[in-house]
Amino acid sequence: MASSLLKVTGGVARILNSSSKTPFAAALYNRRWRSAKAVSYEQAVLNMPETRVTTLSNGVRVATEDSGIITSTVGLWIDAGSRYEDPSNNGVAHFLEHMAFKGTKKRSQTDLELEIENMGAHLNAYTSREQTVYYAKCFQKDLPKAVEILADITQNSLLGDQEIERERGVILREMQEIETNLQEVVFDHLHAIAYQGTALGQTILGPTENIQSISRNDLVEYINTHYKGPRIVLAAGGGVNHEELCKLAEQYFGGMTAGYEGEIPVLPQCRFTGSELRIRDDLMPLAHVAMAVEGCGWQNPDNLALMVANTIIGSWDRSHGGGTNLASELAQNAVKFNLANSFQSFNTCYTDTGLWGIYFVCDRMMVDEMVFNVQTEWMRLCGGVRESEVERAKNLLMTNMLLQLDGSTPICEDIGRQMLCYGRRIPIDELERRINAISADTVKEVCMKYIYDQCPAVVGVGPVEALTDYNRLRAGMYQLRT
């Protein structure tokens, strides 16, 4: 069938058939049609903008990806989080993140807020167990001002006594809000029992008694100890010129020290402990349960295979619908036997360790059955996973990774995180080759190493009377084969 083209002439629409055109017109039409086609996936991946990295004399790293758009995201990624705290000052990193926006030597809190608002920008921060992040989203033309503001709030915060006292109440209210988020509660308990007596077992916000006692000296000491040049990455994505950002970094961050006056802080080692915690409350409508084994760190080559295994288990929610045609076998069983309201697998990584497991919400009478089905799937990963499942999971994993890079802020975050975790940003084409190299045998081998016959950490909150006894649950971590 000959192709056709809708053309409007003098307000009248008429169809032009390519076969009725002159040879020159038909060739021109076909050439334009071909040029409008999207590039292939391989071309798109190879043509993604490079990540440029420059290290200043004091160790601060500047990393950028210029995508040529009119907006930018720039931020500071600092290798400092709650893992670098001890029981006496747990919560200081998060407290410091709050105080960064309460005024500096140049700007009051009101001046800072008005300046950001008048730029049409967005300034934010967050604290995790291993990282503290401050970032700004703005127009490309306002990038120098955004960098100057980031430098000001991280190096010149007043940390006034009145602001500290006021912020105590804010953080305590934040802690109360988190207590109502049962998923957050379960994961905090999971870290507490999986890494008992270690820094990773601490919460990010810290205990109430610490929040009530943290002083200005604690905040200043944390800054002087951990906000050092080699532990900082200035990352930017969107419309950004690398050379100009390097000049700004030298101007505003070049004076940061790289050395330590006292003892050099080292990353505390955190051991994993198989254990369980049950917080029974029969008045709650549903049981919230998390099960995890020890995973691996960011740089461990087994990490990608564990991510594929995590994708095979997948996630599901009753509101999503679906049935026997769902890709995840655990999701199929959840629908078929009404096992749970929702579940999601997770692979949480840190520098030298990690948690690989599943979190689910279910009726009190289905907890034991859900645990049995989860462990059946885990054992299948260790010995009976199919090649087709692995291929599907690899495609889904790669798609999710690419979808998470949609916009300047996710790109900036990806740059900053990878620079701290890997010391470089892994190119997409390299990441794809490494994922494609994973086979069903690779998944089986890695799962045998991390899941099979391992002691899990288990947390149950709510009506968890039917949660499987730990000895039985531990016995389900291996499967005898004949």
Image: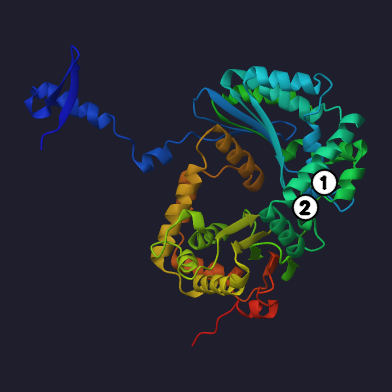
Q: Which residue is mark 1?
A: 91
- Does the rendering let one see residue 253? no
For the residue carrying disc 1, how many other residues have a C-alpha within 10 Å: few (<14), some (14-19), or many (20+)? many
Outermost residue to the bottom: 482
Disc nearer the start of the sequence (1/2): 1
Q: Is residue 116 above or below residue 183?
A: above
Please tell me which residue is depicted at 52% across the width and 34% down the height of the picture.
407
Q: Position of residue 296 (x, y in %)?
A: 64, 60
- Does the rendering let one see residue 161? yes
SS at mark 2 in the image: loop
Asked whether 179 or 139 is in front, the reply is 179
Asked whether 376 or 57 is in front, the reply is 376
Please tell me which residue is depicted at 81% across the width and 18% down the height of the picture.
106
**Colour mode of the rendering:** rainbow
Q: Which residue is mark 2?
A: 203
Residues at marks 1 and 2, CA–CA distance in whole angstroms: 8 Å
Circles 1 and 2: CB atoms closer than 8 Å: yes
Q: Position of residue 43 (x, y in %)?
A: 37, 39
Q: Position of residue 258 (x, y in %)?
A: 79, 36
Please tell me which residue is depicted at 70% across the width and 36% down the height of the picture.
125
Q: Position of residue 47 (x, y in %)?
A: 42, 36
Q: Amino acid at mark 1?
A: Gly
